[in-house]
């Protein structure tokens, strides 16, 4: 027995639980980062080798069509799961998403090898089907992971969001290296695509292993899942069982877990209370996806960089997007004002005419600058919103709110993808 500074008695169990609360924090952050990479690396691979698909399917607008196929499945899946979030096993949901990503990425690789890197309507339809599978997997895992990490420490969700951006940066840098290596070789684009999806398949397999065997057993993750269960969460049951924590007692002194659904705000109440955050994410991604990647591939004209131009633009966006997601780690640089976040999201609409006039009258330097600013504001504002919004809520509410905010984010992406086609209409492409 021991006493604290106020003379109150602390039990041995309290003493044993306190240091374990933060045990394994850095390992968990590293795993969250890798899981973030795995949540988008396959899709980013498909986007980043857009020059390969434009070479195979020059008349089909693959950059825009594949995105348009992908997003309804991502949004629809997230909407259904967000509505039923409180009764869904989050662990099984995330694991299903990773398995679908792994199998679909492997099938993209098989499809490309089977067709020997040749075009054709069969290859294109198969690619569209697999893009839809990517959307399904995204809908499963992004909302599940953000919801699950929302009731843990903010560093976890920040690491996961940084991993999402890192997947794009990693693939973009790899694209630059493969273009340098294979540019003058026979079937260089095809060889680069094979390398991309081989690496992506390995990363997805690694994520399955880490999430299944390692992440739920970290002491800090056990602590937060136990805390969520005490607050009435039903979604953490599989994590508790996998971590060898019993529903009634634990191995440190018979701690009772009340798994009954306690009083909590409904999804409607949570949405209305956080309507401004939902609007923030929607607007951020409407602007981003109305420009990236379709406009950058098809509407920026020809410049001195030649075939390198869209690759440089995509790479700059992804790298700056990744860097910006670490800016809020510095507390005084983190934007937490709800009004300021909304104003910033609205002002990003000025980027649309800025890109239009730069593409029409500006040089490549200004376009690279604008693309970098697009990535900077996208990553920074996303992390600010998703780490500030869950504060002040209980575990089940934080999980539900995380799912709702991801749904708004994907709604913005879907709307942006649709608006992106207006560039083609404006240029008389139809």
Image (cartoon, grey):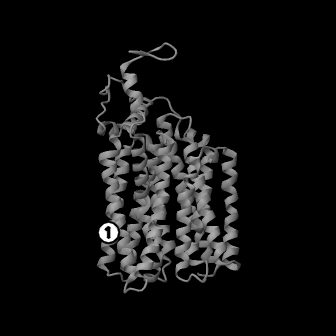
128 or 169: nearer the viewer: 169
Horizontal placement of 7 versus 253: left or right? right
Horizontal placement of 247 versus 134: left or right? left
Quadrant where the N terminus is found in the figure: top left
**In the image as oriented, which residue stretches furthest toward the top?**
7
Label 1: which secondary element: helix
Question: Where residue 217 sits: x, y (%)?
Answer: 32, 40
Can the viewer see residue 214 in this picture? yes
Question: Where residue 314 sits: x, y (%)?
Answer: 53, 70
**At x 45% / y 64%, what residue is drawn?**
170
Quadrant where the C terminus is found in the figure: bottom right
Can the viewer see residue 119 in this picture? no
**At x 43% / y 40%, what residue is drawn?**
86
Question: Where residue 374 sits: x, y (%)?
Answer: 61, 63
Residue 33, placed above or below residue 308:
above
Residue 155, placed above or below residue 140:
above
Place residue 427 in its image quadrant.
bottom right
Question: Where residue 186 sits: x, y (%)?
Answer: 37, 87
Residue 268, placed above or below residue 115:
above
**At x 52% / y 82%, what residue is drawn?**
307
421 or 63: nearer the viewer: 63
Residue 403, placed above or below residue 301:
above
Place residue 183 in its image quadrant.
bottom left
Q: Residues within 10 Å of mark 1 (few under 14, many from 20)?
A: some
**At x 42% / y 36%, what residue is drawn?**
22
Residue that badge 1 annotates = 107
């Amino acid at each position: 027995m021991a006493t604290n500074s106020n003379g109150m008695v602390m039990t041995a169990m309290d003493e044993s639980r306190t240091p374990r609360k933060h045990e394994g924090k850095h390992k968990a952050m590293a795993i969250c980062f890798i899981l973030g990479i795995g949540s988008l690396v396959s899709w980013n691979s498909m986007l980043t080798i857009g020059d390969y698909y434009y070479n195979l399917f020059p008349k089909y607008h693959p950059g825009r069509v594949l995105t348009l196929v992908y997003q309804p499945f991502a949004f629809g899946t997230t909407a259904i799961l967000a509505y039923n979030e409180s009764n869904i096993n989050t662990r099984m949901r995330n694991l299903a998403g990773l398995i679908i990503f792994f199998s679909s990425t492997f099938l993209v690789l098989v499809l490309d090898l089977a067709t020997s890197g040749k075009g054709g309507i069969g290859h294109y339809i198969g690619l569209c089907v697999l893009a839809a599978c990517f959307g399904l997997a995204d809908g499963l895992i992004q909302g599940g992971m953000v919801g699950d990490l929302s009731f843990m420490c903010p560093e976890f969700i920040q690491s996961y969001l940084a991993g999402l951006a890192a997947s794009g940066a990693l693939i973009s840098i790899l694209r630059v290296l493969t273009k340098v290596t294979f540019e003058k070789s026979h079937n260089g684009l095809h060889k680069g695509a094979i390398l991309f999806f081989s690496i992506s398949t390995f990363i997805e397999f690694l994520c399955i292993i880490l999430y299944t065997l390692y992440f739920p057993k970290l002491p800090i993750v056990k602590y937060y899942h136990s805390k969520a269960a005490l607050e009435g969460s039903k979604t953490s049951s599989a994590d508790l069982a996998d971590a060898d924590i019993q529903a009634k007692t634990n191995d440190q002194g018979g701690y009772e877990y009340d798994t009954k659904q306690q009083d909590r705000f409904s999804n409607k109440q949570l949405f209305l209370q956080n309507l401004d955050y939902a609007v923030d994410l929607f607007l951020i991604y409407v602007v981003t996806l109305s420009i990236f990647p379709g406009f950058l591939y098809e509407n920026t004209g020809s410049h001195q960089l030649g075939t390198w131009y869209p690759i440089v633009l995509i790479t700059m966006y992804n790298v700056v997007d990744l860097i910006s997601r670490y800016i809020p780690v510095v507390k005084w640089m983190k934007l937490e004002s709800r009004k300021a976040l909304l104003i910033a999201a609205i002002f990003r609409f000025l980027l649309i005419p800025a890109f239009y006039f730069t593409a029409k009258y500006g040089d490549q330097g200004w376009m690279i600058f604008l693309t970098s600013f697009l990535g900077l504001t996208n990553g920074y504002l996303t992390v600010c919103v998703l780490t500030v919004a869950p504060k002040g809520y209980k575990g089940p509410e934080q999980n539900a709110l995380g799912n709702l905010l991801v749904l708004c984010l994907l709604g913005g992406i879907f709307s942006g993808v649709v608006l992106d086609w207006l560039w083609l209409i404006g240029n008389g492409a139809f």
